[in-house]
Image (cartoon, grey):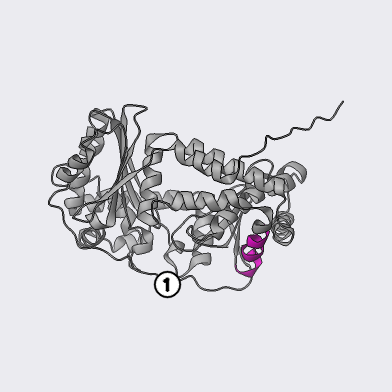
């Protein structure tokens, strides 16, 4: 049989490719209101839908030690009663209007979002204004929701991957708050009452610490609509506090635990903040290492070595220095030590010799394709602009792409030499089958 070689079409110059990516999304319009609220409008009239997102610069990173989980706890309470919306009423009203809503808390921020038909999206502003102005925080509701979160913690503790991830992060980051679980601990939750929640809300849930994004089929008078909705809400500017850096560690720290029925491994080691110029290069390196069937780890551990069921690599995107993590599940009967040695060998090989030109091009194509697919929906476009404004600035995604698309194999080899060093200060955790 004749061997057939597939030839990839030549890529555009990175400047032209970047311009094409920018033209996929509508250009945002940003305005800072007198009370400090940053409003970003992303007009997209392809479908009669409007998505809103309010992003607060407050997450686990901003919690006081001993009160871990307060940011996530408050996220729950934002649906449990404000002046004009009783407990559960926000969800009920959203469904009645044919919309959807949700929220999530991360280490760096807390996000609340709605999607409505274009003729009824203003209700989202009414709700956000009402709960920004103040919550009821009824002690009975606080007590009830604390129990809900405790059950969440139990669920995560019972899931082997979540339990392993929590322990690995604690060892890598301490004393930095990225090492603390977003849900908090049982001990910390016991100390969080309505007073603690109210203090956190009053400190961080103010216009000057929020970004409101409105994306979709908005009317021309949208700026006036927002001005009217949030009139009368004031709040002094807030400077985000710095936090203690993680402790410097030498060597690779290992631990083992037993839970579940199969062997799982997490290897994590330091990586730069998302604003660092090396972060896009490390994103490409993580793709070369562990993204997709053509990645080095997949070929070595799954296809050729048949040591693992699957393997992946993930790079954290955060305002403070984060981490690069390799996760895998071992084929039953395979000795974990073989897997560990091969993972470290592949990382060391990539660090010492760097990626090939073809590997770099593949990683760039994969990242770009995933990004385009991930920003098709109006809400995703809203979140892109809002998170950039809340955590970095509006140009952050495009600077990131500029560094990513312009990177070559030599530059990635230099970045690999700087950052692909898990044995210099990483954490490797095993979750082995319970005996």
Among all residues in the image, which is located at the extreme right?
Answer: 1
* 424 in magenta: yes
State the image coordinates of residue 202 (x, y, percent, origin top left): 21, 60
Q: Which residue is mark 1?
A: 244
Mark yes or no: residue 341 visible. yes
Look at the picture and state if 385 lies above or below 267: above
Look at the picture and state if 423 lies above or below 38: below
* 230 in magenta: no
From the viewer's perspective, tell me whether residue 150 is left or right of residue 13: left
Q: Which residue occupies 25% across, 45% down?
A: 79
Look at the picture and state if 123 lies above or below 337: above
From the viewer's perspective, tell me whether residue 355 is left or right of residue 385: right
* Majority secondary structure in the magenta region: helix
- Disc tally is 1
Please rate how many residues cluster around mark 1, counting C-alpha atoms within 10 Å: few if below 14, some from 14 to 19, many from 20.
few
In this view, the residue in front, 298 or 183, is 298
From the viewer's perspective, tell me whether residue 236 is left or right of residue 313: left
Look at the picture and state if 392 lies above or below 15: below
Image quarter in which the N terminus is found: top right
State the image coordinates of residue 295 (x, y, percent, origin top left): 68, 46
Quarter of the rendering containing residue 432 = bottom right
The span shown in magenta is 413-425
From the viewer's perspective, tell me whether residue 138 is left or right of residue 317: left
State the image coordinates of residue 419 (x, y, percent, origin top left): 61, 63
State the image coordinates of residue 32 (x, y, percent, origin top left): 25, 52
Mark yes or no: residue 329 visible. no
Disc 1 is placed on an element classified as: loop
In this view, the residue in front, 415 or 25, is 25
In this view, the residue in front, 127 or 372, is 372
Q: Which residue occupies 17% across, 45% down?
A: 227
């Amino acid at each position: 049989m004749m061997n057939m070689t597939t030839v990839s079409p030549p890529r555009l110059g990175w400047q032209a490719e970047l311009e094409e990516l920018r033209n996929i999304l509508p250009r945002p319009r940003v305005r800072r209101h007198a009370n400090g609220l940053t409003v970003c409008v992303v007009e997209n009239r392809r479908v009669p839908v409007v998505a809103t997102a309010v992003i607060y610069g407050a997450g686990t990173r901003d919690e006081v030690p001993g009160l871990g989980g307060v940011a996530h706890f408050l996220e729950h309470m934002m649906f449990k009663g404000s002046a004009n919306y009783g407990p559960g009423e926000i969800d009920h009203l959203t469904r009645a209007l044919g919309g959807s809503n949700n929220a999530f808390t991360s280490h760096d921020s807390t996000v609340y979002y709605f999607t409505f038909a274009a003729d009824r999206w203003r209700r989202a502003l009414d709700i956000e204004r009402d709960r920004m102005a103040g919550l009821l925080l009824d002690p009975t509701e606080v007590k009830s929701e604390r129990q809900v979160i405790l059950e969440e913690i139990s669920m995560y503790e019972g899931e082997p991957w979540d339990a392993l991830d929590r322990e690995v992060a604690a060892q890598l980051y301490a004393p930095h708050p990225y090492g603390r679980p977003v849900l908090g601990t049982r001990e910390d939750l016991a100390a969080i009452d309505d007073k603690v929640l109210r203090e956190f809300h009053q400190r961080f849930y103010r216009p000057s610490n929020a970004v409101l994004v409105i994306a979709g089929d908005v009317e021309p008078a949208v700026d006036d609509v927002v001005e009217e909705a949030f009139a009368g809400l004031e709040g002094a500017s807030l400077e985000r506090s710095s936090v203690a850096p993680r402790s410097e560690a030498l060597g690779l720290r290992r631990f083992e635990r037993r839970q579940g029925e199969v062997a799982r491994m997490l290897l994590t080691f330091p990586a730069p903040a998302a604003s660092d110029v090396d972060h896009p290069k490390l994103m490409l390196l993580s793709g070369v290492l562990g993204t997709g069937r053509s990645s080095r780890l997949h070929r070595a551990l799954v296809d050729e070595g048949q040591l693992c069921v699957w393997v992946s690599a993930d790079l954290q995107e955060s305002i403070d220095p984060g981490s690069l993590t390799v996760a895998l599940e071992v084929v039953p009967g395979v000795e974990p030590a073989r897997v560990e040695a091969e993972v470290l060998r592949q990382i060391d090989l990539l660090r010492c010799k760097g990626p090939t030109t073809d590997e770099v091009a593949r990683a760039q194509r994969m990242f770009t394709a995933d990004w385009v697919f991930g920003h098709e929906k109006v809400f995703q476009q809203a979140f892109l602009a809002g998170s950039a404004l809340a955590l970095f600035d509006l140009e952050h995604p495009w600077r990131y792409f500029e560094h990513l698309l312009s990177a070559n194999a030599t530059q990635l080899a230099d970045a690999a030499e700087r950052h692909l060093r898990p044995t210099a200060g990483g954490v490797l955790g095993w979750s082995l089958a319970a005996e």
